[in-house]
Image: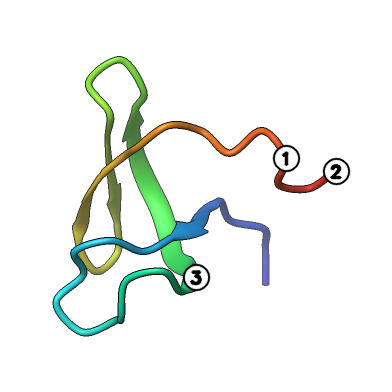
Amino acid sequence: MGHAFALTGIVQGHPRIDDGRRVVTSQLFYLDPNLGIARTMNRWYRLGARDRSWGQ
């Protein structure tokens, strides 16, 4: 099994996950940071501001 990219962040406006929860998505296969959108295997995401404290 290989490596894959995913999104991680705090949820807002997801149809099945409560706002404020930290999540990791399914595999990321499209990302356009200029438009602020991303596509995973399951859905499209509208991206907010990057959390620069994450992973430090």
Q: Residues within 10 Å of mark 2 (few under 14, many from 20)?
A: few
Image quarter of residue 53: top right
Of the numbered discs in the image, which one, if any, rests on residue 23?
A: 3
| Residues at circles 2 and 1 in contact by the CB criterion of under 8 Å | yes
Secondary structure beneath label 1: loop
Q: Residues within 10 Å of mark 1 (few under 14, many from 20)?
A: few
Image mark count: 3
Residue placed farthest to the top in the image? 34
Coordinates of residue 51 in the picture (x, y in percent): 58, 39
Q: Residues within 10 Å of mark 3 (few under 14, many from 20)?
A: few
- Please give the residue where the numbered disc 1 appears in the rendered image: 53
Quadrant of the snapshot with the N terminus? bottom right
Q: Is residue 21 left or right of residue 39?
A: right
Image quarter of residue 47: top left
For the point 41% across and 69% down, the residue is 20
Q: Is residue 56 above or below residue 31?
A: below
